Amino acid sequence: MLIAPSILNADNLNLKEKISKAVDAGITRFHIDIMDGHFVPNLSFGPELVKDFKREFPMIDAEIHLMSNQPKTLVPEFVKAGADSIELHYEAMSEEDLEYWIDYIHSNGLKVALVLNPDTSVDVLNKYAVKIDQLLIMTVYPGFGGQSFIENSADKIKHAREILDNLNPKVPIEVDGGIDNKTAAIAKEAGAEIFVSGSYIFKNGSISGQINELSEVIK
Ligand code: DX5
Ligand code: ZN
């Protein structure tokens, strides 16, 4: 079980301080949301942020959630910036491109996750399970932090777990969107092992207190 805080809704002008507090509370991976204003209706960070992150926190993993349909422009830049893993949306590109970018990322020594939006069927895993290191199931429609967990996500997580258990059992399921101490328990019960959480960790007072509470629920 792992918590990967999303820094999207952490105070952008005090990011280093906020990230340090989470690291002091035991966090070893951050989830960095990249939004291009096109695939999703919002803008966020770019490769420079990832470069700065890895300079300041070289031992901490930077997981890039790429919400963009411009992989050709962006994937090589995030690889160069020092990302540890890149998460590609099934909906963002053709299957041919998806296969190309999965291979590209792997050949550069990074891990790859496939991301499925709430309306995308887990059946696509039949094709991709053997090619990926992690599956990210979106539990909100991507684009903004602070949304509510979509209730029927639990069934989807269970179904995905079954398919992965058959085809590539070592692939963990991560969930992203509306994760707090209640929804994390639901997702864990369904088979999730990695929990992205933004607002719950960074917008509720004590960062270490929130991380500890979430850790209790998922341990
Ligand atoms: C949504 C992002 C999420 C989100 C998580 O598009 O992918 O990572 O920022 O934030 P919370 O936990 O606030 O839903
Ligand atoms: Zn995300």
Image (spheres, grey):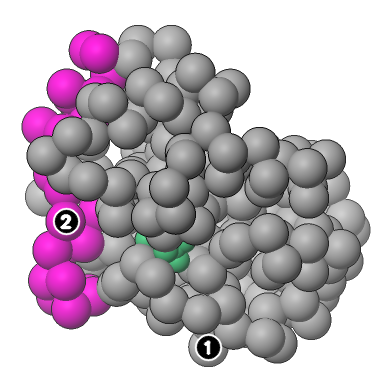
- Specify whether 137 is left or right of 186: left
Q: Quadrant of ligand 1?
A: bottom left
Sequence-wise, which precedes: disc 2 or disc 1?
2
Say above or below: 118 vs 51.
Answer: below
- Specify whether 100 is left or right of 161: left
Place of residue 153 in the rendered image (x, y in percent of width and height, measured from the top left):
68, 79
Q: Is mark 1 within 8 Å of ligand 1?
A: no
| Badge nearest the viewer, 2 or 1 | 2
Q: Is residue 40 magenta?
A: yes
Query: Label 1 amino acid?
Result: Asp
Q: Secondary structure at mark 2?
A: loop
Mark 2 highlights which residue? 44
Residue at position x 30%, y 71% from top?
144
Q: Quadrant of the C terminus?
A: top right
Number of residues whose C-alpha sits closer than 10 Å to that of mark 1, classed few (under 14), some (14–19) or many (20 or more): few
Q: Quadrant of residue 54?
A: top left
Mark 1 highlights which residue? 119
Q: Quadrant of residue 20?
A: top left
Place of residue 207 in the rendered image (x, y in percent of width and height, measured from the top left):
47, 39
- Could you say which is closer to the camera, residue 60 or residue 74? 60
- Which residues are drawn in magenta? 34-56
Place of residue 196 in the rendered image (x, y in percent of width and height, measured from the top left):
53, 52
Residue at position x 58%, y 63% from top?
179
> How many marks can you see?
2
Say above or below: 35 vs 11.
Answer: below
Q: Secondary structure at mark 1?
A: loop
Q: CA distance from mark 2 to mark 1?
A: 23 Å
Q: Is residue 42 magenta?
A: yes
Residue at position x 67%, y 47% from top?
214
Query: Label 2 amino acid?
Result: Ser
- Could you say which is closer to the camera, residue 137 or residue 202? 202
